[in-house]
Amino acid sequence: MTVNDFAEMKRSGRRISMITCYDYWSAQIIDQSTVDCILVGDSVAMIIHGYENTIPATVEMMALHVSAVSRGAPNKFIVADMPFLSVRKGLKHAMDSVETLMRAGAQAVKIEGVSGHEEIIHHIVESGVPVMGHLGLTPQSVHQFGGYPVQGRKEDEVTALKAEAKQLQELGCFSIVLECVKSDTARTLTRSLQIPTIGIGAGPDTDGQILVLHDMLDLFKNVDPRFVRHYVRGHQLVLDSLNHFDSDVKEGSFPSAEESYL
Ligand code: KIV
């Protein structure tokens, strides 16, 4: 997949599948799958590093994970998140951050919001770096939202989202993530744009869907947002395997003769 395929998939009505990935081993599995593309999201701060939100993610943290993912999934289109405040400290800081992520192996960057960093988005696009927008619930603004509320319920929110989506399209973004947006608002936005929307908690009518890999695999007990579908009970599977290993060791059945150098 290349950046051009996003527009082509929207034109032909083929839905886009995207999954988060942060490390080499899972990137290798995703590379063998039919999933279209990868996001190295700043959710890495929560999922891999155990922070409460995405604010602790830094460009250095992102670059380390992007480089591991790019070695594991050389055949997938990889988008890297621009972390907290990286587009709010002036053009030079933003471009240095983009350079670091692209040199680490990303093929595009994702930027939350638009207001106040329109020129930076335009400059990144003009510099030959594809930009994915991100509207709706933008987790880097968690403290301004006061949590993670669903967006696009009120009339003024819908009007603002429409204007922002149009603006991102005009700035040259190749697609837009819509996070936690009321389904009919996401549908309206999707229909109003030439570039594809990729939804997470935004209902069935976006042009594509993204999930956090670890949510999809149910690796965290008690994390169960309404929009996640669990494809395997990963937490239980790993726990059972560990307990099985432990009991094999303790009863002396591991390793067997076949598992030993005789
Ligand atoms: O960081 C992330 O995982 C994301 C997705 C939730 C879209 O931005």
Image (tube, rainbow, N blue to C red):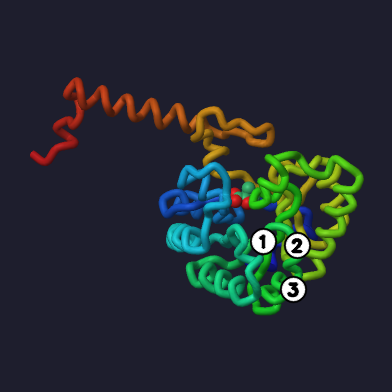
Mark in the foreground, 1 or 3: 3
Locate residue 256, reporting x and y percent.
17, 30
How far apart marks 1 and 3 lie (CA) works out to 13 Å
Q: Using the rendered view, name the quadrant where residue 203 is placed.
A: top right
Q: Amino acid at mark 3?
A: Glu
Q: Amino acid at mark 2?
A: Val
Q: Amino acid at mark 1?
A: Ile
In the image, 91: left or right of 21?
right
In this view, 122 is above or below 27: below
Locate residue 222, reporting x and y percent.
55, 28
How far apart marks 2 and 1 lie (CA) works out to 8 Å
| Residue at 56%, 34% in the rendered image | 231
| Residue at 24%, 25% in the rendered image | 248
| Residue at 65%, 33% in the rendered image | 225
Q: Using the rendered view, name the quadrant where residue 212 is placed.
A: top right
Residue 18 visible in the displayed image: no
Disc on res. 119: 3
In the image, 73: left or right of 194?
left
Mark 1 nearby-residue class (10 Å; few <14, some 14–19, many ≥20) = many
| Residue at which label 1 appears | 111
In this view, 66 is above or below 170: above
As drawn, which residue projects farthest toward the bottom? 127
Find out whether the residues at labels 2 and 1 contact each other: C-beta distance under 8 Å: yes
| Residue at which label 2 appears | 114
How far apart marks 3 and 2 lie (CA) works out to 9 Å
As drawn, which residue projects farthest toward the top? 251
Locate residue 11, reporting x and y percent.
80, 60
